[in-house]
Amino acid sequence: QVHLVESGGGLVQAGGSLRLSCEASGRTFTDYRLGWFRQGPGKEREFVAGVDWSGNNRTYADSVRGRFIIDRVNAKNTASLQMNALNSEDTAVYYCAAAYSWGPLDNIGTYPYWGQGTQVTVYS
């Protein structure tokens, strides 16, 4: 079992930055890959970014590529999502997720473990 806790959400002005963190516990951190997903108002949950076991391979949704950076610090059992140049379309609840399988990082079905989410609201 993996327990994930997100933090760092909040209210930010358009154009600003925010850094989300995900703290993991329960199993060996390097056993699983990590992803960030988000669910905006009235929208389905969507992939944002993912990183493999080592942290060397990252993938991003087209909507955030070049603005967001996913990272993981295996020694601290944490992952992060640095979000820059935020706009109103980024307003959502952001979720950290963990996967043991070899499924695609951008596929929600790959991830059996989820955090409770953290709200990010971008205002103009």
Image (tube, rainbow, N blue to C red):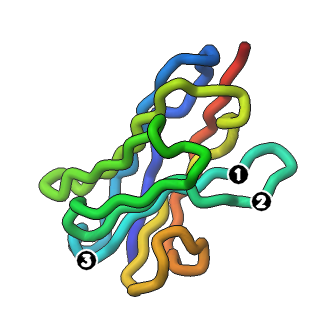
Within 10 angstroms of label 3, few (less than 14), some, or many (20 or more) residues? Answer: few
Q: Residue 120 location, x and y as percent?
A: 62, 33
- SS type, badge 3: helix
Question: Callout 2 environment at 10 Å: few (<14), some (14 to 19), or many (20+)?
Answer: few
Asked if 110 appears above or below 41 in the picture, the reply is: below
What count of labels does the image hold? 3
Amino acid type of the residue that numbered disc 1 sits on in the rendered structure: Gln
Would you place residue 2 above or below residue 6 in this image?
below
* 70 relative to 7, above or below: below
Q: In which quadrant is the C terminus drawn?
A: top right
Q: What residue is rendered at 55% in x and 54% in y?
A: 61
Disc 2 residue type (three-letter): Glu
Q: Residue at x 47, y 35 (%)?
A: 67
Give percent across and percent down for residue 59. 42, 60
Give the residue number, with chain letter if any, for mark 1. 39
Quarter of the image where one finds residue 10 = top right
Mark 3–mark 1 contact, CB under 8 Å? no
Image quadrant where residue 51 sits: bottom left
Determine which residue is flagged by label 3: 31
Q: Residue at x 25, y 70 (%)?
A: 53
Element class at badge 1: strand
The answer to the question of whether label 2 and label 1 lie on touching residues, with beta carbons closer than 8 A, is yes
Tag 2 residue = 44
Mark 2 or 3, closer to the camera: 2
Q: Is residue 116 visible?
A: no
